Amino acid sequence: MNIFFYVLIFLVVFSSLNFSVNAKQENYYYEVQFGNFIVGKAEVFFRLGSQNLNINIKSQTAGILDTLYEYKGELKSSSIKVTGSWLPNKFSASGLFNKKKRTTEITWVNDYKNVSYINVPIIDLEKYHEIQNSSLINVIDPITAFIRVIEKINKENVCEKNFKVFDGRRRYNLKIKTIGNNTIDNDRPKSYRGNVLICGLRVFPIGGHRLKTKWKPSEDKISDFKVFFGKNSNNDYIPVRVQVERWFGTIVIRLIQRPI
């Protein structure tokens, strides 16, 4: 379920920055598809202030996946703008998977250079790699990282960025790279059709990932995780699709336009 949850985060974070100058709060709705089935959905709420941004994401499984692996999660983050740059302030995540609950809370301290965090339950080192304290200096949460990326895309039309990311349970390095431009069709009702900028993502695990897993990070390609950006009516790039290639198949997430 980590894949499901974090794929939602990537799309939701990118699109949460799609607001006009005068907007203070908005919400968006997404659907996750695997094969011909809708397997997940998410809704994001955000509030924007002059120097702060608060995001609340609620996600859950749907359809057949909800029957087999019921999951509900909520993520909250607050970022603060200091000297023109977004910095992480607080980050929390909670999830209920097959009736087992777990929570994470992180606070950035010492001028946002260090973290204080709590996990319930604590990380089981018989199942997961240990996270070394030395790797937690100058880290950023995944949402604040992507806030910086979306700003770079709209200013420079590229998405090259590298981050040291920590979400409370996983520590990883994240590489984001421009793949190129293309045109996509609206393959589903209410989906996007037109020119897109494609960005690729790659994760390099540092700690907190499973000891035994079919995932082989060294075999990943930057094109395995793609985010497609199209322009909105304000001529700003926003995410219109995410496509993730995994060993078990392809996951696609689409921003769905709800009836007004």
Image (tube, helix red, strand yellow):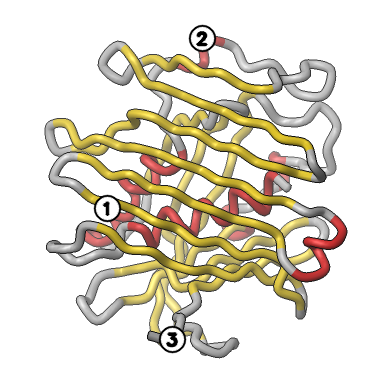
Real-space Cα separation, disc 3 to disc 1, in angstroms: 31 Å
Q: Nearer the viewer, mark 3 or mark 2?
A: 3
The residue that label 3 is drawn on is 259
Q: Is residue 122 left or right of residue 185?
A: right
Total numbered labels: 3
> Which amino acid lies under the numbered mark 1 shown in the image of this protein?
Lys
Is residue 190 or residue 28 the one in the foreground? Answer: 28
Residue contact between numbered discs 2 and 1, judged by CB atoms under 8 Å: no
> Which amino acid lies under the numbered mark 2 shown in the image of this protein?
Ser
Is residue 99 or residue 173 the one in the foreground? Answer: 99
Real-space Cα separation, disc 3 to disc 2, in angstroms: 49 Å
Q: Is residue 182 above or below residue 216?
A: below
Question: What residue is at 82 percent from the left and 54 percent from the top?
Answer: 69
Q: Position of residue 145 (x, y in %)?
A: 39, 41
**Crowd band around label 3 with a 10 angstrom C-alpha radius: few (<14), some (14–19), many (20+):** few
The residue that label 1 is drawn on is 152
- Looking at the rendered structure, the secondary structure element under dot 1 is helix
Q: Tell me, for residue 143, which label it has, or none.
A: none
> Which amino acid lies under the numbered mark 3 shown in the image of this protein?
Pro
- Looking at the rendered structure, the secondary structure element under dot 3 is loop
Q: Position of residue 151 (x, y in %)?
A: 26, 53
- Looking at the rendered structure, the secondary structure element under dot 2 is helix
Q: Is residue 35 left or right of residue 103?
A: right
* First-in-chain label (2 vs 1): 2
| Residue 42, quarter of picture | bottom right
**Crowd band around label 1 with a 10 angstrom C-alpha radius: few (<14), some (14–19), many (20+):** some
Is residue 59 or residue 246 the one in the foreground? Answer: 59
Real-space Cα separation, disc 2 to disc 1, in angstroms: 29 Å
| Residue 252, quarter of picture | bottom right
Q: Is residue 194 left or right of residue 253?
A: left
The residue that label 2 is drawn on is 134
Question: What residue is at 82 percent from the left and 59 percent from the top?
Answer: 248
